Structure formats: C-alpha cells, structure tokens
Image (tube, grey):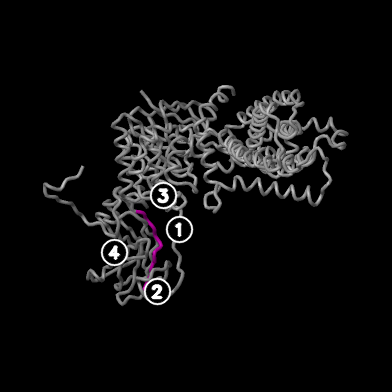
Amino acid sequence: MSAIELSKVSKTYRRYSARRFATLKSALLGRSLLRELQPDETLMALKDVSFRVAKGSAFGVIGRNGSGKSTALKLVAGITKPTSGTVRVDGRVSALIELGAGFHPEISGRENVFINGIMLGLSKREIEKRFDDIVDFAELRDFIDAPVKTYSSGMYMRLGFAVAINVNPDVLLVDEVLAVGDEAFTHKCLDKFRDFRQRGKTVLLVTHSLGLVERLCDEAVWLESGEKQADGDSKRVVDAYLTAVDRSEERSLAASAGAARYSSPAPAANMFHASEGRWGSGEVEITAVALLGQSGEPSFVFHTGDSMSIRLSVRAAQPTSDFVFGVGLFNADGVCCFGTNTELEQRQPYLLAGEADVTFVIDSLDLVEGTYKLDVAVHKRDGAPYDYHRLLYTFRVASRSRDVGIFRPRYHWTFSSNVRFR
Amino acid sequence: MFSNLGSLLRYRGLIQSLVARELKARYRGSVLGFVWSFVNPLLLLSIYSFVFMKIMPGNDPRVTPFAVFLFCGLLPWTWFASSLTEATSSLISGGNLIKKVLFPAEVLPIVSVFSNMVHFLLGLPILIAFMIAFRHYPTVGVLPWFPIVLAVQLIFTLGLAFALSALTVHFRDVRDLLTNVLTLWFFATPIIYPYFMPSVSRFLTLFRLNPFYHLAVSYQEILFFGQFGHARSLLLLAALSVLVFLGGYWLFDRLRDSFAEAV
C-alpha cells in the first residue's frame, strides 16, 4: 500500500517574456488575455518522474540545487498541479515547506497558533486540545503571549514547526527545515519523525543532508535536472549520488589543472606564506605532475583513507648530483598539513640524469573532508630552486563522516558498560 | 467550479478567524487601538460636512441635516472602495501562503471584503449617534430593506474582488487603474450630492447604468428619506450581482492554477 504515488509526472514552468506586460487594455480588448498568458519559453522542472512511497516509511528526495526536489514536494503537497501525469496522496498532508508562512507579525504567538492551525486544517477545538503540546514542543511557554514580531527567527521557526507537526497528518512533507534550529531542537524533530513512523505515518524528506537520508529514510529517490536517476534503498541511492558528485568534481578539477608555467624567478621568502606560482632556474624541470588513485588511474577526488600517489616527471638538462625533491600538502585555508623532502629525510643525492619519474606514495590519506592544494619542488641542497610549483595542483578529499580539523588519526572509542548509545 | 464554490462554506472558520486577525492586527501598536474604527469615519465625515456645509453651502433643503445624508452614502462607499483596494493586492501580499502552503486562495479577497464590512458595521452606531444628535430618525417600516441592500452590496463586491484580485496577479496595472477608477466612480455616484438634483435627472439613463447608483440611492432612501421606492431596481441589481459574483469566481477559478507560479 503506497501513501504517495507519482506516475509519469512532468511539471513545466513558464517563462514569460516582457511582451506579456504590454498593456492591460490590449489584453482585454483584443480578447487575447488567455493567449497573452501562454508561455513563450518553458522550463521542465520535472520530466516523467515516477516513484511511490510506502505507507509508514520515511522517504528521502536528494539531488543538487535545481534538480526538481522542491517542485516534487510542492506537487505532493498539492500547492501546484502537474503539467502531465498524476500525483496521488493518501490521507491528510502537512507540509513543512516554509515554517510559519501564515504568521502575522503583529499578533501574539497564541493567536497565531490558532490561525495557523486552522489554515492547516484543524478545528478550533482540536487546537485547544493540542495547544499545550505545541507550546511545550516549541519551548516558548514564556513568550507565547508576545507578538510574533518580537520572536527571534529560531523561535519563529520552532513555533511554525510545532504547529505543523501537531496537525497530526498522515503524510508529512519536510523541505530542508531542520537546518533552522539548534542541535537540541533538531534532535527533538528527528525523534518526532521516528515517533511518526512508528505510528504508521509517512515522512517525505527533501534535504541536502545525505547523512540524514541514510539514517532516517528507508528509501530515497535521486533527481537530476528533473529526471529520476535512481530510487530504492536509501543507502544505495546516496552511494550512487555521491559517486556521481565525485565524478563531476573530478571533471571540473581536471579541466582546471592546466600545465604550470614559470611565473617568477624568485621564490617566496617564506614557504608557509602561500601564493601560487612556479619559479626556479629550470636546470632540472618538473614536466608533469599526476595524482594517482589506488589502482594507478589519474584521479582528483580521494576518499579519506585511500592511498594517493603523486607522480613527478622530471628532466635534468645536465646530469647533476645536487638535487632535493619535496612535496607539501595545504588545506583550503593555506595551512600546511604535511611537508617533507628528501633532504629532511637525509637521502644523499648521487645522480639525476635525463628523464626520470619520482613517485611519492601516501599509503593512507588520513585527511578530513575538504579541498587541498599541492606543492611540488626540486631544488638544490642549499635551497636554490630548480623548479618550484607552488599550490598549482588541487585535489579533493571526500569523507562520509563529518569530522573536522586537519588530520584524521586512526582512532577508536572504548566505553565502559554503563555508557550506552542507541 | 461549482464544487469549488461549495467548498467556500467549508472555509467559514478560516475566514472568520482571518477576519478577526485582520481587525486585531490593524490597530496593534496604536494608542487609540480599536477606537480608530469609530474615529476614522467620524473624521472623514467631519471633513466632508465642513466642506459642504461651511465652504460650499446651498444644498437642497430636502437633504438637511446634510451630515446624516452624507453619512448614509459615504459609509457603504468606504466599505466598497477599501474592499476592492485591499482585495486587489490580497493575493500578492498573501503570496507566501499561496506559494508555500496548501491554502485556498479565494479566502484572501473574501477576508478583505469581510473585514471592511465589519468596519462598515462599526460605523453604523456613529450614524445612529448622528441621527440622534440631529433628531432625524429613519422610518421603521422600511428598515427591513437594509439587510437586503447590504447583502446585494456584499455579493456584488465579492464578485468584483475575485475578478480584480485574480487579474492583478498577472497585470499589476490593475492596482493603479483601480485607484483612479474608484475616484471617478465616487464622483459619478450620488453620495455627496442628492440623486434628485436636476443635473442627475438630465443624465439619469447614464446614472442608472452605474450599479453603485442603485446601492447609494437605496441606502439613502432607507436610512434618510424614510420611504423606499427603489425596490425594483435593487432586485434587478441583486440579479446582476449574482452574475458578477459567478463571473468573478469563474475568472478566479480559471486563473487559480497560475497563482502559485505568478505571484
């Protein structure tokens, strides 16, 4: 039994040209009112999308900005109608799309609760019965008789959320609203969603928080420019989505990684003052830099814990015995996360002649999620650069966990038996 | 369309509480608060009375006391004009509700008309106070016609409010157009002058085409002159009002699906 069913739904938004605003008179007298309202251009927000949501399940809708997620939600809510196809929803719907959309700033929270509740389809008596629950949930007992315009935006959202969720709908539509509250309130909302599902109600969640979809949803659908890319088990859909995001990031990083050119002859005074460029005498030249993934293929996006190889192709004009190879990793703030060179490691240079490959292999890339830049260099033992590439190569570390900082040590927790998690 | 029309009754509670909210919110933060509902028409009336009794005297003796006569036409006109002005922008100012919540859009223009009707009704005690002050009382026999005129005006105004609010979503020009049309309409209706003035009689056919002419004359006959001879025209207008109402709602219903996108 499905609570929501979209079959072959398309939604076309109209884009009007300026012509439409010609004059009211011509529109009325020329009997062209309806013609003037015809679109010149259309935008397909959804194309032939079908999915169904089982009763009592939580269902996630994911995708980039502009992929049609919110349009799908509005169709389910009944706010807009599909251009073609059918949307079927079973039971009372409450949409957490814009919290407190109907609040009037001048009147008190109490009065707004009543009016908002009536707007969402409750009777006065039903609201009276739930009033205390609503106020307690919103944690606004002390402010409920103050005009809503005096509320902070968090209080406003909390009250809106509390009313909407207490409408006791059969189907709850949630659009990215969990971002508004503090941590504690977000947890309370999540608990409420779980409680909802236990009572056999359906939750449809539109969000950019993939972790939330994995944790909360049984199934999910992934939309991309209005088309369904995948649906089914939420973990599988999220994985497919992440893989696609990696691939497109990879493409854009690859496009920006052009050949490095000499920019200035002199090195920056301080290695830790980041400013990108390339300099050096050129007696030894780094002709190419490649980042390689686990299986040796060029790559720009790595997952935490993957292995990464930095391969330098170098060419020495004359054989030399004075050379040092170095690498440095910098995060987006310009902080050096790690740097080393062969001199620091006390390798005695003996001979570099002609074309050569130098590979720096990181067995496990223990960095947190983020964008990183790379320094590579070859210079003399006294520091005079042959070829210094400063922050010219970019790669991304993707991580499924949301830890922060710079370094991600190998770690685990241990707890004594009286500390428990659910 | 008719099933949608039927569901209007379901929104009774919603309309009721929104009208109440509108009235409450309107005077929040003002010192006089709700008293403004009485003071506003009083001040308006004082201005008109001053102009027409002191600056431009010489009214027909049949319309003394002039202030009471003026009030009988001015009060319903204010209801009509401000209803339309508010209804016209109601969908745009309530855009948040239409776009983000499943909300019956027709409730918004209806609320504009009804909240102004409440102001109209609150003006009546002032009219009565004036009648007592000037010792000019209406005839009880024709008073039962009063709720009928009121109902006709309500239906007529609602119909126009539907049409105008829906059109404004697509043509913002309607708002500016309406302001000017209402000014013209006000002076083309016997409110600040009696309907039996010779200049009115000369263009009587033209005047009779103005729906509000019949409403104004009816109010004045019932509340001021004490004899109602306009019943036939009023009933004709009632029929027209029903047509305007249905036509306005039809247009509103036609354009309904475009609101969420165009607001």
CB within 8 Å, label 3 to label 1: no
What's the distance in space between the residues labelled 3 and 2, CA to CA? 30 Å
The chain containing the residue under callout 1 comes to A
Name the kind of residue labelled 2 in the image.
Ala
Residue B224 in percent (x, y) is at: 73, 35
Q: Nearer the viewer, mark 1 or mark 4?
A: 4
What's the distance in space between the residues labelled 4 and 3, CA to CA? 24 Å
In the picture, the disc for residue A338 is 4
Q: Which residue carries the number 1 mark?
A: A258
Say if the magenta span includes residue A26. Answer: no
Q: Nearer the viewer, mark 1 or mark 2?
A: 2
State whether residue B179 appears in this view.
yes
What's the distance in space between the residues labelled 3 and 1, CA to CA? 16 Å
Ranked by sequence position, the earlier of labels 1 and 4 is 1
What's the distance in space between the residues labelled 1 and 4, CA to CA? 24 Å
Q: Which residue carries the number 3 mark?
A: A249
Give a yes or no on whether discs 3 and 2 share a subunit.
Answer: yes
Q: Secondary structure at mark 1?
A: loop
Residue A354 in percent (x, y) is at: 35, 65
Q: Which residue carries the number 2 mark?
A: A268
Ranked by sequence position, the earlier of labels 4 and 3 is 3
The chain containing the residue under callout 3 comes to A
